[in-house]
Image (spheres, rainbow, N blue to C red):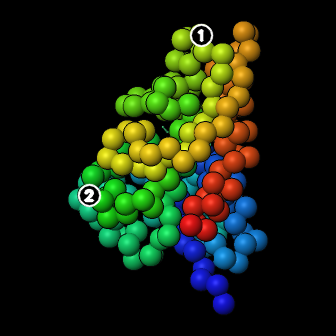
Amino acid sequence: MKKVKNILIFVSGNGSNMSNLIEHFDSNPEVSVEAVFSNKPACVGIINAQKAGINTIAFTPEELHSGRVAELAQLLNPDLIVLAGFLLKIPKEFTATFEGKILNVHPSLLPKFGGKGMYGKHVHKAVIAAGETKSGITFHFVNEHYDEGNIIAQFECPIAPTEKVETLQQKIQQLEHTHFPSVVEKLLAQ
Ligand code: GAR
């Protein structure tokens, strides 16, 4: 019998990527979404995870920094920790505990438009303001620096001359929903 692979998903907001991953792996007996962790106990992501019957764990920034969250995560023996719209910086102790096991998706073609304050719509606004003709998404491993871990895969989309933040956000979300499950699967297969 094949070993079941455990994944943990970290969210801070709507969690549309989280919902997409939960739905995708629901029918896969080899991959289990063991829990959804969030620093925002009432965010849409947490509520939807609960509706989907997934164990949820809310925590404070202090618990992330004290090592408590790492302890709780270790108890669940994760093969992969997936950051899907998780907006707090991951502390060094946490990345050291789960080295090579934390995946993030970022809504730009890193190294462009990454770093502190670059999340969600702020990224798309900056990309359009810079006159870029393309944007995209980056899947990367997480280290203690914002958006600087090794890149795993990138996917692009064109930017129209009339592009608005909202339309770019939709394109990016579509790209994420299309590619996230297979990137997770590939990492779990390694
Ligand atoms: C996604 O677009 C993700 O790339 C971005 O937040 C959004 C979350 O959407 N993450 C970052 O900006 C991290 N720096 P979701 O909550 O609907 O999945």
Which numbered disc, 1 or 2, marks the residue that appears first in the sequence? 2
Q: Is residue 127 above or below residue 51?
A: above
Three-letter amino acid code of the residue under disc 1: Gly
- As helix, strand or loop, the secondary structure at mark 1 comes to loop
Q: Residue furthest left?
A: 66
Which quadrant of the frame does ligand 1 lie within?
top right
Q: Is residue 128 above or below residue 19?
A: above
Residue carrying label 1: 131
- As helix, strand or loop, the secondary structure at mark 2 comes to helix
Name the residue rendered at 64%, 84% in the picture: 2
Can residue 56 be seen here?
no
Query: Residue 112 appears at what percent x and percent y?
Result: 49, 26
Query: Residue 57 appears at what percent x and percent y?
Result: 45, 64
- Ligand 1 lies under 8 Å from the Cβ of mark 1: no
Name the residue rendered at 65%, 21% in the picture: 134
Instruction: Quadrant for residue 159, please give it.
Output: top right
Residue carrying label 2: 93
